[in-house]
Amino acid sequence: MYQKELVTTYEESNQSSLDVNNKYIEFVKYVRQATQKHLTKKADKNKKRKEWMTDEIMNKVDEKSAAYVKWQNHRGTADEDKYKGKYTVLRKVVKNMINERQIEYWNKVSSEIETAITQHDPATAYAIIRRFKSGKQDVQNMSVKKKGTMLLRSDEKLERWREHFEELLVNVNSAVGTHTIDSISIPNISTLEIQRQDKIPTLEEIQLALSQMKSKKAPGNDGIIVDILKAGGTPGLIWLKELSVEIWENERIPENWSSAILIPLFKNKGDKTSCDNYRGICLLNVVSKLLTRVILNRIQIMIDQQLLEQQVGFRSNRSTVDQIFIVNMIMEKASEYDIPLFICFIDIQKAYDSVNRELLWKICSHYGLTDKIVKSLQLVYKDSNARVKINGDLSECFKMHTGVMQGGIPSPFLFNIVFDFIMKKVLSETKIAGVQLSYGKNDFCHGRKEKYENFEVLSLMYADDLVAICNSREHIETFIQVFERSKGLHKNMALL
């Protein structure tokens, strides 16, 4: 029924002369009404049921509750002791059943964790442990004044969070000179590549993008979640496709697509009462994220082929485990052969929030993105604004002038492009060698004629984390100095 009514809504909106903004407003209005009418879930008594709970215990709990009601209904009568006795017995039975079941359950869980560790499978062990970790973070008492005085009133806390993120996302320190931006070259793009990137979104692309989006995620300011879009079926896909085509051709998006809700999340390090130790996650409208997913699917492989091999963050078949293994092996071999080793760990300060957007778009063009793709990505960032949400309360709106919005689908991808561009400049300017390594190329048939392949490792990256590795203090200092002069990002460094 929801899908049938969606067809009617789509036909009515097509017959009207509404622009993109008003069409989207009408769609959101209908979806909210239809959700209440057709898709509202009935209360599920098992929704918050503990993992150790069984149907047998639940039935006995219901029986105990019924016995309690009967006892209360017969208070002051001749049968009071009889009903009280039944309730008392059932209460003890339920308590014993719960105790026995909990012991049985936790013994089983402990056994599963021990088995995973014994079989050298830490991923499974940590996955089991994470099931019992609460994901909710309470930020109600996690803000302080700039002078260090704890805030008590909720409106003061909310205003403090707004001030913090406004200062961060205006970020005058991210300014980059026009000469630096103008000096970035833009390659010629073939006609076939332009046609591939600039073609209008197809129904297949919309369907693929929607299937890639995770369900049960928080919505943006329009309240529409991914699950509602997926429930729309083919009629919903057609509506989303036509909206995307209109946006693509006119280069204009609904007004509230540029508005985000900022949720502070603790970084699990540092003082919990300091706003600096929280990252702001942007809750964006899911339909806007759908369109950016379509764009990302078109360009991701092409860009990935241009990125440095040292970068493993947010790339397929790569992991931080690889980088940890490499660093450990280098340290182990350096110690074994008594080779001097200098390692510098560099963390980009407020990495996602410090990216200069003008620099970002020029770098995107430098990596072969067409003007159409760049403009489409810019649409969401143009006039972008946000409101901080704490305990259900929203702050006043403020503009966001810098950074790639954390929580946006293309954000890790866009940051990787900027970081890759800067690192290539740093590596070309330093002109120094990293750690010299080699590996054997022999096989079982030519064991005595072993050949070696030599290579260098100067830097390793995972998203915004960087480690530089050299055999001399002079080289590591040169690397740090050149990196310090790089434009567009700000650093925190630790030298070992």
Image (cartoon, rainbow, N blue to C red):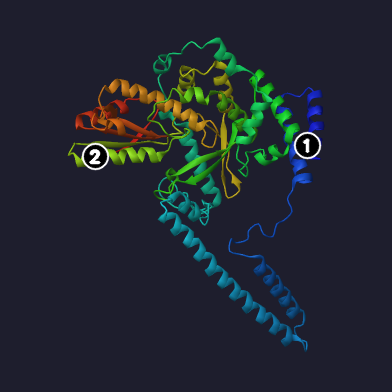
Quarter occupied by the C terminus: top left
Q: For mark 1, what is the residue?
A: 3
User: Regarding mark 1 in the picture, which secondary structure is present there?
Assistant: helix
Q: Nearer the viewer, residue 353 or 167?
A: 353
> In percent of the image, x 74 and y 38: which residue is there?
31
Quarter occupied by the N terminus: top right
Q: For mark 2, what is the residue?
A: 333
Residue 305 location, quadrant: top left
Q: Amino acid at mark 2?
A: Lys
> In percent of the image, x 43 and y 45: which residue is there?
277
* Visible residue check, residue 177: yes
Residue 485 numbered mark, or none: none
Q: Nearer the viewer, residue 253 or 335?
A: 335
Report the side of 24 relative to 393 (left or right): right
Q: CA distance from mark 1 to mark 2?
A: 63 Å
Q: Quick check: 369 above or below 222? A: above
For disc 2, the neighbor class at 10 Å (few under 14, some 14 to 19, many from 20) is: few
* Visible residue check, residue 382: no
Q: Amino acid at mark 1?
A: Gln
